[in-house]
């Protein structure tokens, strides 16, 4: 049960992070600047890492529970 709680807490943190970065995108990506491209790449890497975590978590629990 401890691993399940950890995974749920991780998913909750990711949901909050995505909501925060959506606001970040609205504020900082409206205008172009010399760093806009770098910021966009960083946000994409962050979203990619979050999705990889969620997929790995799902696969782990599918394996442990035998569910599909």
Image (cartoon, helix red, strand yellow):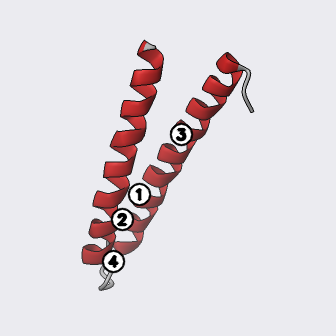
Q: Is residue 11 above or below residue 24?
A: above
Give the structural element (helix, strand or loop) at label 1.
helix
Give the structural element (helix, strand or loop) at label 4.
loop
Give the structural element (helix, strand or loop) at label 2.
helix
Quarter of the rendering occupied by the N terminus: top left
Give the structural element (helix, strand or loop) at label 3.
helix
Q: Is residue 66 above or below residue 51?
A: above
Which residue is painted at 73% across and 21% down in the image? 66
Residue bearing mark 1: 42
Residue bearing mark 2: 39
Q: How many discs appear?
A: 4
Asked if disc 2 and disc 3 are in contact, CB closer than 8 Å, the reply is no
Residue bearing mark 3: 54
Q: Is residue 45 above or below residue 5?
A: below
Residue bearing mark 4: 29
Mark 2 nearby-residue class (10 Å; few <14, some 14–19, many ≥20): some
Q: Could you say where residue 27 lies in the image, as x and y percent from the top left? A: 24, 76
Q: Earlier in the sequence, mark 1 or mark 4?
A: 4
Quarter of the rendering occupied by the C terminus: top right
Mark 3 nearby-residue class (10 Å; few <14, some 14–19, many ≥20): some
Asked if disc 2 and disc 4 are in contact, CB closer than 8 Å, the reply is yes
Which residue is painted at 33% across and 84% down in the image? 32
């Amino acid at each position: 049960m401890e691993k399940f709680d950890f995974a749920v807490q991780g998913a909750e943190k990711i949901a909050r992070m995505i909501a925060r970065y959506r606001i970040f995108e609205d504020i900082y990506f409206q205008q172009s600047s010399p760093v806009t491209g770098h910021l966009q790449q960083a946000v994409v890497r962050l979203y990619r890492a979050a999705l990889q975590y969620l997929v790995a978590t799902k696969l782990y629990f599918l394996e442990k529970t035998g569910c599909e």
